[in-house]
Image (cartoon, rainbow, N blue to C red):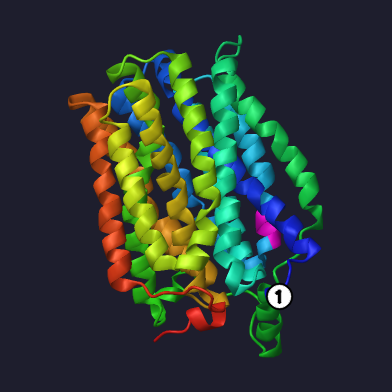
Amino acid sequence: MRAPLTEYQRRLIVLLAAATFFEGFDFFALAQILPQLRADLHLDEQQGGMLVAFANCGAVLSYALVQFAGRVGRRRALTLTILGYTVSSVLSGLAPNVWLFALAQLCARFFLLGEWAIAMIYAAEEFPADRRATVMGTIQAFSSLGAILCAGLVPLLLRTPLGWRAVFFVGAVPMLLVAVARRGLRETARFEALTIARTAAGGAALPASLTRIWRTPYRGRMLLLAALWLLTYAGTQSAITFWKEFALAERAMSDAQVGTCLTVAAIGSLPLIFSVGKLLDRLGRRLGALLIFVLGAAGIALSYTLHGQWPLTVALIFALFGVTAVLPVLNSYTTELFPTELRSDAYVWSNNLLGRFGYVLSPLLVGMVAQRTSWSLAVASTSGFLLLAIALLLARFPETRGRELEETSALH
């Protein structure tokens, strides 16, 4: 019988879930205001894609925060991200032109994605092996709750005198409450043990340079994970970002209809998303990933090719499920396949520095193709990257279900 979670572990889940909650809110916010933002700032489809791609560069730069977590501890780095995201969100709403808006959104993604990555490392290091994926999946599922809140609020906020700017002001306020709640957060036991071991061995408390993982036997494993992250981001990053553009331009839907579709789809996907962690712990990472990636690819393709509000809404449920559910799979592998002293470095390189090329380039290329063809063709074709990703996963990645980090991180 599994031991129950401690009071601190239960509280930790809630605190870490805030990171993905606001990641979901911010991700949906930009997607829902993009048509109005483009009109207000006089941007065409390609320029809109360039704006999203530039903002997404913040996710690449967030490697610095993850590396910081590997130097001074998970707790201090996680606390830093809260204030940074709050300030960046407010500045996004105050931006007088596209240049300052893009810079503010780049900073928002920098802090938000750094917080998200550190939260996943926290979850991997602080929870038992038989619940690791369940906890990580639950935390990631809060992204959908943030999306639901955003989908319901944005149509109302767009009708206020502040318009799209109000979305970023509203999104910043709750983070102040989270900052207060996280005062009781402790450093992870594994990082504390690593620090003590380094000190006892007479070494520096701080790890070596960012490039050290390239000089270890884990280099090949890290590069495989980077390819997996890149393909996955290329297949998911544009799916929701441009769906409103597609629905308004190519299916003649109204703002109200789009809001209804997104809200219903977000709510409908919620039970599926909250089941992902348990699915990965019960079926295993490989079989669970196969189900998730195939359903996600089908949902993305159909949500840009079907006709009619309700068929599109059903397809969007599975697209939202796929976009969110792939992340616990990749987070599990990224945190499980490396030792504690290399875990942050592996996350930095495989996700932030290399994998995020798919995150940045996908909206840029989609915007270019859409301007010359259609949103339907441009985005639906990206679902093929998810099929390539699952093929790579099944071919090269082991099963890690129910095994402690010390075992899964060992090279074989």
Q: How many marks?
A: 1
Which SS does the magenta portion mostly show? helix
Which corner quadrant of the image does residue 223 belong to? bottom left
Tell me which residue sits at (47%, 84%) in the image: 410
Q: Say if 5 sits above or below 361 in the image.
A: below
Which amino acid type corresponds to the residue marked 1 in the rendered image?
Glu
239 is higher (above) or lower (below) than 231: above
Check disc 1: other Cα within 10 Å, few if <14, some if 14-19, many if 20+. few
Circle 1 sits in a helix, a strand or a loop, which is it?
Answer: helix
- Which image quadrant is residue 174 in? top right
The front one of 43 and 244 is 244
The residue segment tinted magenta is 75-79
Rendered position, 69 above or below 326: below
Q: Is residue 8 visible?
A: yes
Across and down, in percent, residue 358 comes to 33, 49
Write down the quadrant of residue 310 in the picture. Answer: top left
Residue that mark 1 sits on: 192
